[in-house]
Amino acid sequence: MGTPSYRLLVIDDSKRDTLLLERILQQANDASFTITHSDSARAGLEELASQTYDLVLLDYYLPDMDGLAFLVEKQQRGMATPVIMLTAFGEERLPVAAMQAGALDYFRKDQVNSGLLGKAIQQAIEKARLQTSAAADAARLRDMEETIARLQAQLQALQQDKGA
């Protein structure tokens, strides 16, 4: 079995940081990554609407909206692509807020290395896949429960008609 390959969308207004992320991901041994870059949140949302990506690496500080607003907008548009948020500045409450807004992970850029980021990307993609699968299973279960309830009601009606 070969190494997995993932399509990533990096949303970051810093070309230097984007190039650094690309270099870090090229060093990952357990996966390969194809990277597309958007330099604003709005451009990133449009890219997500037009292309399929396995994961978004999202900078918190963007010129047109912050990462939390991006996550809210992404969710409102019904986009399910998982997100890992990155920032150059470590604010105490930001990791919790990012996770509550829908990010699957959060890192300070100065803490990122190829092993850590590669593993986090794979785990986030797998977690998102499992969440999607669980939601689909729950929907199928609800449908089956509704069908069973409907059939039980029909059976009771038939039994009552027979008894009358």
Image: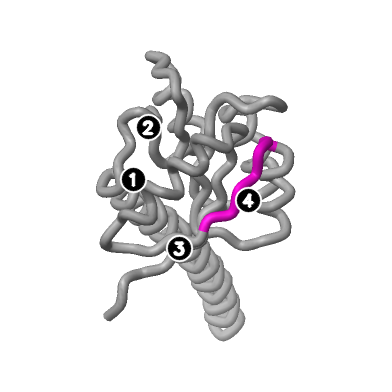
Q: Quadrant of residue 66?
A: top right
Q: CA distance from mark 4 to mark 3?
A: 18 Å
Residue 31 x/y as whole percent? 34, 63
Amino acid type at mark 1: Leu
Residue 50 vs 124, above or below: the answer is below
Amino acid type at mark 4: Met
Secondary structure found at label 3: strand
Residue 145 x/y as whole percent? 49, 66
Nearer to us in this view, 87 or 122? 87
Residue holding disc 1: 117
Q: Are marks 2 and 1 in contact (CB under 8 Å)?
A: yes
Q: Quadrant of residue 92?
A: top left
Residue 59 vs 79, above or below: the answer is above
Q: Are marks 3 and 1 in contact (CB under 8 Å)?
A: no
Q: Quadrant of residue 143?
A: bottom right
Which residue range is magenta in the image?
A: 35-41
Chain-order first, disc 2 or disc 4:
4
Residue holding disc 4: 79
Residue holding disc 2: 107
Q: Quadrant of the N terminus?
A: bottom left
Q: CA distance from mark 3 to mark 2?
A: 19 Å
Amino acid type at mark 3: Tyr
Residue 143 vs 109, above or below: the answer is below
